[in-house]
Image (cartoon, helix red, strand yellow):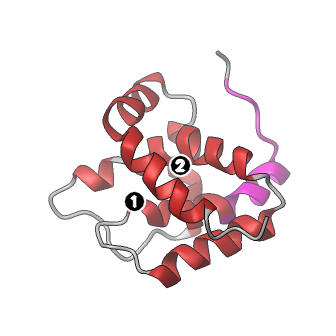
């Protein structure tokens, strides 16, 4: 399946969502306020919850899931330019998607359920 082309405008629109969702992959236990922040960004994005879940699973997770496997993973967060670069690099990668789905489906389902429960929709 071909990866949908993203214009610079669409990338700019997705970047805050990518950045917020990347926090789910930090090497730390997120607090309630962290999840509220992610949900607020999702609410402000204009994307539907289903669209954001797809963005999480197919764009953000393949770019950041390896941080969960790292002995000393990132725990403070990534700057937007790094998020943009990593997501665009991994977006559509068959290997990244397969590894993501095989090894982290329960994790993604649980994290997304926590965020989705806080959405204002």
Quadrant (top left, top right, bottom left, bottom right) of the N terminus: top right
Q: Residue at image x 39%, y 74%?
A: 30
Q: Residues within 10 Å of mark 2 (few under 14, many from 20)?
A: many
- As drawn, the residue found furthest toward the top would be 1
Q: Position of residue 120 (x, y in %)?
A: 76, 71
Q: Residues within 10 Å of mark 1 (few under 14, many from 20)?
A: many
Q: Position of residue 62 (x, y in %)?
A: 45, 41
Q: Residue at image x 52%, y 71%?
A: 79
Give the label on residue 25, or none.
Answer: 1
Q: Are marks 1 and 2 in contact (CB under 8 Å)?
A: yes
Q: Secondary structure at mark 2?
A: helix
| Vertical comparison of 43 with 2: above or below | below
Label 1 or label 2, whichever comes before in sequence order: 1
Q: Position of residue 110 (x, y in %)?
A: 44, 53
Q: Secondary structure at mark 1?
A: helix
| Vertical comparison of 82 with 54: above or below | below
Does residue 104 appear to the left or right of 121 in the view shown?
A: left
Find the magenta span and give its range.
Answer: 3-16
Q: Position of residue 116 (x, y in %)?
A: 62, 60
User: In 3D space, how far apart are the residues under numbered discs 1 and 2 (Cα atoms)?
Assistant: 9 Å
Give the label on residue 60, or none.
Answer: 2
Q: How many marks are shown on the rendered structure?
A: 2
């Amino acid at each position: 399946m071909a990866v949908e082309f993203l214009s610079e405008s669409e990338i700019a629109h997705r970047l805050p969502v990518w950045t917020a969702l990347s926090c789910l992959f930090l090497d730390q236990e997120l607090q309630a306020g962290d999840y509220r922040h992610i949900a607020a960004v999702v609410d402000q994005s204009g994307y539907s919850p289903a669209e954001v879940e797809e963005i999480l699973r197919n764009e953000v997770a393949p770019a950041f899931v390896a941080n969960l496997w790292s002995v000393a993973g990132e725990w403070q967060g990534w700057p937007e330019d790094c998020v943009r670069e990593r997501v665009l690099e991994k977006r559509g990668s068959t290997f990244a998607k397969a590894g993501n789905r095989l090894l982290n489906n329960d994790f993604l389902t649980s994290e997304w359920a926590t965020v989705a429960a806080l959405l204002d929709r």
